[in-house]
Image: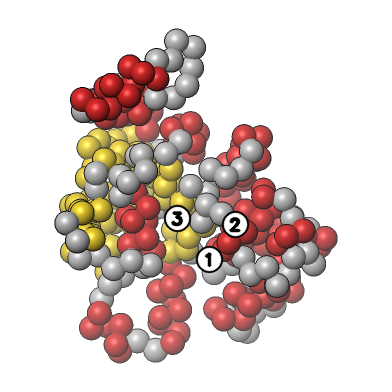
């Protein structure tokens, strides 16, 4: 059995009376891929932001390799190198790559800035070439500004920048949702290859069950801030136990699809 890489324990986050994340726990194995699925408002993105450190939980813990990422007492004592090392543990790729890239900075410049911050003594030119090759880009893209690239190319750049710091966990928040279907397939294949080569762990945040089926080993289904079902992806999608999971599967358009019946089932749930 593979060791646990990332563990969330009893995460809670409220905004006034709304419990966005309510006692959420899960584990991600080393080199594994875990999907968190649910409709808009289910709490999946808030959970991801807590894992990365962009949101602070009201309660619970996030551990990487068994170490608590929210050790406030230790944080006051850490130097810059220790804080950067903690930041490198978990990186995030967002839904819209254009918004996550500086429009005034070339691809090579963006990667160089990241490397200078985290690895000031490294051979940056060589590493930039390696990163671009890893995501299927080359010298032409290195000199380009984000607006000169396609959506798929920009997402490849965002992935390269996240990989530049050599994270243990990559959180992908709807990372292919804004892309054409053919480009989605290319990015998902790329991510599969990277995981196989590097052993990195993935946390996929998505509403798309097709993505979950293709790229995750295990899945967590969230509704109204809580986990309603969890288990191996193949089992959950083939034989869902919770009515909400079945509703998500029935909501995928296909021959014989009944949107009115699905809407009625959702209101009754």
Mark 3 and mark 1 in contact? Answer it, CB < 8 Å: no
Residue 74 shows up from this direction: yes
User: Which tag is nearer the camera, tag 3 or tag 1?
Assistant: 3
- Mark 2 sits on what residue? 97
- Mark 1 sits on what residue? 166
Q: Residue at x 58, y 61 (%)?
A: 99
Q: Which numbered dot is residue 171?
A: 3
**How does the figure colour the protein chain or chains?**
secondary structure
Q: Quadrant of the C terminus?
A: top left
Residue 59: percent from left, percent from top: 18, 64
Packing grade of label 2 (10 A; few <14, some 14-19, many >=20) is many
Mark 3 vs 2, N-terminal side: 2
Per the image, label 3 sits on a secondary structure element best described as strand
Q: Quadrant of the N terminus?
A: top left
Q: Nearer the viewer, residue 176 or 163?
A: 176
Mark 2 vs 1, N-terminal side: 2
Q: Is residue 81 above or below residue 194?
A: below
User: Which tag is nearer the camera, tag 2 or tag 1?
Assistant: 2
Q: Quadrant of residue 198?
A: bottom right
Instruction: Give the number of marks.
Output: 3
Q: Nearer the viewer, residue 248 or 129?
A: 248
Q: Is residue 166 above or below residue 208?
A: below
Label 3 and label 2: CA atoms lie apart by 14 Å
User: Which tag is nearer the camera, tag 3 or tag 2?
Assistant: 2
Mark 3 vs 1, N-terminal side: 1
């Amino acid at each position: 059995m593979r060791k646990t890489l990332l563990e969330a324990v009893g995460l809670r986050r409220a905004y006034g009376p709304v419990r966005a994340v309510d006692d959420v726990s899960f584990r991600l194995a080393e080199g594994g891929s875990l999907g968190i699925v649910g409709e808009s408002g289910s709490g999946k993105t808030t959970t991801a932001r807590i894992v990365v450190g962009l949101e602070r939980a009201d309660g619970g813990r996030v551990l990487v390799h068994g170490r608590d990422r929210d050790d406030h007492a230790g944080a006051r004592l850490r130097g810059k190198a220790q804080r950067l090392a903690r930041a490198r543990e978990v990186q995030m790729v967002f839904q819209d790559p254009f918004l996550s890239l500086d429009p005034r900075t070339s691809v090579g410049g963006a990667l160089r800035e990241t490397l200078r911050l985290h690895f000031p003594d490294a051979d940056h030119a060589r590493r930039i070439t390696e990163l671009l090759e890893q995501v299927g880009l080359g010298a032409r893209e290195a000199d380009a500004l984000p607006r000169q690239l396609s959506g798929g190319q920009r997402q490849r750049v965002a992935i390269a920048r996240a990989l530049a710091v050599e994270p243990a966990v990559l959180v992908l928040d709807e990372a292919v949702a804004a892309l054409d279907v053919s480009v989605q397939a290319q990015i998902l294949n790329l991510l599969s290859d990277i995981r196989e080569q590097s052993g990195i762990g993935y946390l996929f945040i998505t509403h798309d069950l097709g993505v979950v089926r293709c790229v995750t080993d295990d899945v967590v289904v969230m509704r109204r801030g809580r986990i309603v079902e969890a288990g191996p992806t193949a089992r959950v999608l083939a034989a869902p136990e919770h009515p909400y999971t079945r509703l998500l599967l029935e909501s995928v358009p296909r021959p014989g699809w009944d949107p009115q019946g699905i809407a009625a089932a959702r209101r009754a749930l």
